[in-house]
Amino acid sequence: MATKEYAFYPGCSSQKGASASNYLTSVESMCKTLDVKLTEIPDWNCCGASIGYAEAGELPRHVLNARNFALSEQHMPGKEIVATCAACWLGARETRERLTHSETLMADTREALKESGLEINEMPNIRHMVEVLIEDLGFDEMKKHVVRPLEGVKIAGYVGCQTNRPFGVDGESFENPLYLDKMVEMVGAEPIPDYEQKVTCCGGALAFSEPEKAQAQIKDIVESAYDHGAEMIVTPCPLCQANVEIYQGQVNKRYGTKFDIPVMYYSQLMVVAYGGDAKAAGLNGQVIKARRLEEIAAKPVKR
Amino acid sequence: MSANTAVADKYRNNFLKEIEEQVEMGDWVKMCMQCGVCSGSCPTNFQSAWEHPPQELFMMIRAGKREEVLTSTSMWNCTSCYNCIVRCPRKIPITHIMHGIAEYAHRIGKAPKMQATRFFSVLFWKNCTNTGRVNELKLSLGLYFKDGFVQGVKNGLAMQSVAIGLIKAGRLNPLELFGGHKCKDQKGIQAMLAKAYEIERVRKAAKMAG
Amino acid sequence: MADIKVAAYICKGCGLGERLDADALVKVAQKDGKVPMAKSHDFLCNADGVAMIKNDIANEGVTHVMIGACSRRAKTEAFHFPENAVARANLREGVVWIRPDTDEARETTQEMAEDYIRMGCAEVKAMTAPEGNPNTGGSKTLLVVGGGITGMTTAIEASKTGYSVVLVEKSGVLGGWAGKLYKRVPVHEPYKSPADTGVADLASQILADGNIKLYLNATIAKTDGSPGKFVVSIATESGATHTEDIGAIVQATGFTPYDMNKLPELGGGKSANVVDQAGLEALAIDAASKDGVIRRPSDGQPVKSVVFVQCAGQRDPTGKHLSFCSGHCCNTSIKQAMYFKDANPDVDTTIIYSDLRTPGNGEDFYRSAQEKGVIFTKGNVAEVVPTGNTSTVKFNDLILGDADASIVDADLVVLATGQVPNSGVNIEAPAVAAEAGAVEVKPISILNLNYRQGPDVPHLKQGFTDSHFICFPYETRRTGIYTAGPVRRPMDIPQAREDATGAALKAIQALENAELGRAAHPRSGDLSFPKVRLEGCTQCKRCTVECPFGAIDEDVKGFPLFNESRCRRCGTCMGACPVRVISFENYSVNTVGAQIKAVDIPDEFSEKPRILILACENDAYPALDMAGMNRIEYSAYVRTIPVRCLGSVNTIWITDALNAGYDGVMMMGCKSGDEYQCHFVKGSELGRVRLSKIDDTLKTLNLESERVRDLEVAITDIQRLPEMINKYAAELVAVGPSPFKGF
């Protein structure tokens, strides 16, 4: 019997062979250690993400998210929905807020859902994985499982946008959220609380459509991490992770920089600190290899 | 000019009203107090080719500058970072309005044709609603080939190193081109979305007529 | 002079006993201070210590008390001996708290303390206990001039407090400008729509109040006397004059809208369809009496579009129009735009502003107007061109960067002109040559004061009456006369109501103090008052000209005639008097002069310079005390004497100090000029004018100009002041010792 159980909304990028598949690997391993049970919502669909706006309109976007709510209710009534992806969490949560505040929108959504034979009776809570960790488990509980502290590793906590705005994690400021730094500290590494680019936008979807704009922002984010002496960057968002990691080569070409800094998920740090090996932490999924973490993950565990 | 792009009678000389009724969250436009915090907070405001910051777009709407607003590329520069929303002292949902104006301009055929983000936005939505889940490979290729086959190959080559990096890391699967992840109940999803579009269309049309 | 018996008490509490040699201090008091009775006590401000002093006063015939303990600003209740002359030597904040506790510093610290004991003994001997002003008046009636919102509120508030009021209104009705409004800006939740003005309610309260005597169609013909005993002649329309005995006066004469005819470029005076805000109120009242539709004045057609031009003739940098912001006009235009929107949402209403300023809860009101569809456009209006029945408003759109923006076919244009205070004659304006053909109409006096310095209260800037903006907003420079409402500064109705309440209370305080022969603020409760030795007076008129409060008139021979209850006890007259015949019982040329002379000046070889600090008791002295409380060290070579105001400093003190061998003198007074912070308004300015001539004195004495330093000090200069003192001490070392030592 797991201590905590949730309906799980992994999102498109977490699927096998997709851009954040290593995120899912590490989350699964992390949850096993923390005794958190995630049950995937059957046949879940894409949240539509913020970038779909040109065609999405208002109602279709909410209907898309509402379908996931309905499926979750059907299969796991009363369970909170947990997302690991910032965009999934934001999209679902926004739909929840809108539907809760507009009877018309709710009625219209119900009508559309009928077409796929689904219905919503109760609005689920939408949680991000870091909320589950911080609020439901707490730092003390998370720290208990640390058996291989990441001693001496200096890590820039890059929170980015969508786990931080417009909703954010409860109790954190939009301008200087600290939870990621606390997580870095929790795994025994050294945080950089005054990392000034921690909430700068990575460019989001513009990294695809207008790369020069996004890459200018990515450059600032990486440069500042280097300026603070960081060895790696950690983030809670798949798009942040991808944008900041995979375009470093292009940024180098554009700006003549020599960036080569690994960008990790918080869950990867935790898995290594919890004694997991490189595979369990999804370290093989790094485009820029996290050598330092690989070394630590190869060390024996002090028990 | 198609009938679609012509101004509805109701909105002649009242662009603000048009935005209020046809754009998601458009009724907030009148509440802007022109402090400029959104402009100063927008990450893309500090880059080239940025015509009008949100605050200015709102003022243009109030001043009835319909053509300039709807054909502008500005709202397509939005990265959905939500910085403007959390900083706006009037709590105006600026990000949503930017998306809303863009969506409306796109809907009535006023948006700049080959604007890259517009193209990508449409591509993304079609990609994800097609099977219910995003196919990242098709999405990328779709974007590269937006300006034709030759340009597509060039774009693809330019991004080759990125793609190879991802493939090596197991985060991009070439086989996705031939299917990939999908929802089971695609039929239900299509029917549901069709209904949603229909309801929304009826509601907007009623406002325009009303 | 009656026999005096001086006693000196040295406190050993608060660490004084550990840091100082108290026995030596007692000896200094006896030997140098020539005080027969000198004692030390472990804890002077406790019940036992105070009882000891009281016992000496009661049983030993002690008349003069010198307390060597903490600052005169501390323990004032414990050391309160109203029947006696009391001097305080500041050994705590002024000595041990600003000196390091080291063996090295011990000698200079002790010397410092000993000097303060000498100074305190010398001072107290030159003092007498103040008796209080005998020329008091006991009228408890308040005169309120002006029957607008401010005046009515003042009258009602004072009456509710139990004081009788005479209310004089120039016109035939109560209400002032507020009475001409259709509605007012809301002051209650939810701040969303225009509200009733409340004028009718206030007016009926006045009429029903037996404590308030109302004169309509009346003006003030003459104001004689001083607080507590003003005699005011009220002229009525019929030509009759009524005389009233008045204790204190509140002038609430309000404002006049800036004349829009001076704004022809904005269409002012060029079309009936261009009105000012008062004009729009009249149209709205007219509409309300008919079908509720506001109509175009030119042809009576309903207004379909209206443009509000903010800052019309206001915030003008060219000097042609008003330079200031009147504060209420943004909210007023928002309210007026709602007149239209509430009646018919289809009326186009545009407010063109450069900076929207919405005081109070105006931000909610502004938001409500946006919700109602009022369009706000940020821009500067360049021109309003009326043609036929409409106007074109041309403006520079500041957001869109469009210099040629325009709104065409506006049915009505409303100009938000500002408030021009009705403040009477500017008595300090340089006399304008009549032959220059000045077109300005000379303002008519409001109070017709029978004062040597002129018939109205002095103005500060832009015609608004002068008051100490930070500390005493309602006080004018005429004691017992208060201004409230837009005559004092531009404001809206809620602010005027608050002003009225404050002024009523200050006026009541003033008339009560006057009856007891005490000073009003800032030396509230002070019983001393200026005494003049007329036989020595040369009728030079410096005191009658300089008194910042117009307290001194002249008799037929040109001798000064003191009106003590107009006096604020600043001592500016005393500082001004070249023959030094003006003094207070507890503050005089002698009380300070004796302290200066009492200091032991070491010879020039000792390398112990002496610096005299004359510090304003309102700002500089508290700042020095606070430096002590913060244990910020400064030079042991300074000897500080508090003065009532820089204006009270008589140049003889500086000459005496330099002659006595002091190496330098620091003057610490408040900021002067238009942005003054002087509690006596003009005191520090007049003091500085006098000091500017000190260079001549220095030349006569063959001394360097560095020997006298004028410092502008604020109460917040807690860190800066010690730095300035130390810097000056170092500079004086470079200048070298005074050549006057040892004479």
Image (tube, grey):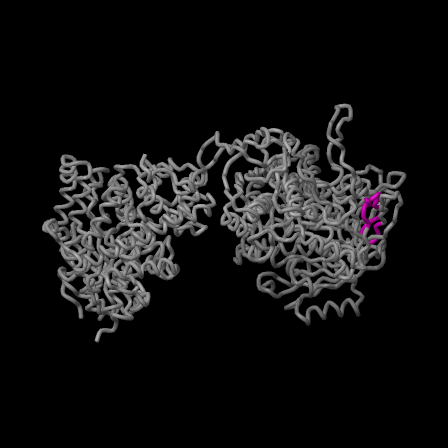
Horizontally, is C207 left or right of C270 in the view? Answer: right
Answer with the quarter of the image where residue B66 lies.
Answer: top left
Identify the residue at horizontal 47%, vertical 35% (top origin): C398
Looking at the image, residue B162 lies above or below residue C125: above
Horizontally, is C625 left or right of A87 in the view? Answer: right
Identify the residue at horizontal 33%, vertical 40% (top origin): B4
Residue range corresponding to the magenta coloring: C215-230
Answer with the quarter of the image where residue A284 lies.
Answer: bottom left
In terms of depth relative to the viewer, which is nearer, C270 or B13?
B13
Quadrant placement of the N terminus of chain B:
top left
Identify the residue at horizontal 69%, vertical 54% (top origin): C502
Residue C439, given in percent of the width and then of the height, sits at: 73, 27
Residue C66, given in percent of the width and then of the height, sits at: 72, 60
In terms of depth relative to the viewer, which is nearer, A258 or B115?
B115
Residue C136, given in percent of the width and then of the height, sits at: 84, 55
Horizontally, is C493 left or right of A215 in the view? Answer: right
Whether residue C602 appears in this view of the structure is: no
